[in-house]
Image: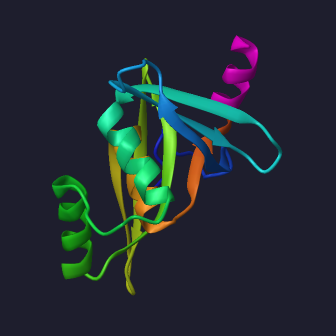
């Protein structure tokens, strides 16, 4: 079954976190820049500075402590023998959302419509692919 937010997956492009920072000098609002291998960039903002700090920490290899909510996902996945394999980011109305794709030996499970910032933090923690809807990169270029 194909859902409108995913299509057949061809509408997505692989991106990596190229920058993590803050929009304001107090670190209240975070920003992440996602970049494709072709050099296209998509800046994502309007999420908490706390999540930005977690993403930066995970990217630097500090995975010794994990926030409770991310730990919950890890424990459930481990108990059910699911492996988080990718995150797909898309726009839903005026906000960014993401789907978490899990795989087990027998099946696949997709958790839909979660905050993109938290999903990107999980992707940084697990070092898994982040796929971003192509149109988000096109819109970012038009805004420049």
* Image coloring type: rainbow
Question: Which one is nearer the viewer's eye here, 65 or 88?
Answer: 65
User: Which residue ends up furthest to the top in the rendered image?
Assistant: 143
User: Which residue ends up furthest to the bottom in the rendered image?
Assistant: 105
Quadrant position of residue 41: top right
User: Which residue ends up furthest to the right in the rendered image?
Assistant: 38
Residue 45 colored magenta?
no
Find residue 101 and report its horizontal and vertical position in percent. Answer: 42, 61
Q: Residue, x 52% and y 65% (percent of image)?
A: 128
Asked if residue 53 lies left or right of residue 44, the reply is left
Find residue 66 and report its horizontal and vertical position in percent. Answer: 26, 61
Q: Main secondary structure of the magenta part?
A: helix
User: Which residue ends up furthest to the front in the rendered image?
Assistant: 25
Find residue 7 and report its horizontal and vertical position in percent. Answer: 57, 45
Q: Residue, x 19% and y 72% (percent of image)?
A: 75
Question: Which one is nearer the viewer's eye here, 129 or 49?
Answer: 49
Quadrant position of the C terminus in the picture? top right
Find residue 84 and report its horizontal and vertical position in percent. Answer: 40, 68
* Residue 128 vertical placement versus 98 (above, below): below
Task: Count the labels in the image.
Answer: 0
Magenta stretch bounds: 135-144
Question: Which one is nearer the viewer's eye here, 70 or 26?
Answer: 26
Quadrant position of residue 118: top left
Q: Residue, x 16% and y 56% (percent of image)?
A: 68
């Amino acid at each position: 079954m194909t859902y409108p937010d995913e299509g057949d997956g061809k509408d997505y492009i692989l991106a990596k976190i190229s920058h993590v920072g803050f929009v304001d000098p107090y670190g209240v609002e975070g920003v992440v820049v996602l970049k494709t291998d072709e050099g296209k960039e998509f800046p994502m903002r309007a999420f908490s500075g706390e999540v930005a700090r977690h993403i930066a920490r995970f990217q630097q290899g500090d995975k010794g402590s994990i926030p409770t909510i991310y730990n919950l996902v890890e424990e459930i996945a481990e108990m059910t023998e699911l492996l988080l394999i990718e995150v797909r980011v898309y726009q839903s109305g005026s906000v960014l959302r993401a789907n978490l794709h899990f795989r087990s030996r027998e099946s696949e499970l997709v958790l839909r419509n979660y905050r993109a910032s938290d999903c990107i933090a999980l992707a940084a923690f697990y070092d898994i692919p982040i796929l971003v809807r192509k149109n988000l990169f096109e819109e970012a270029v038009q805004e420049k």
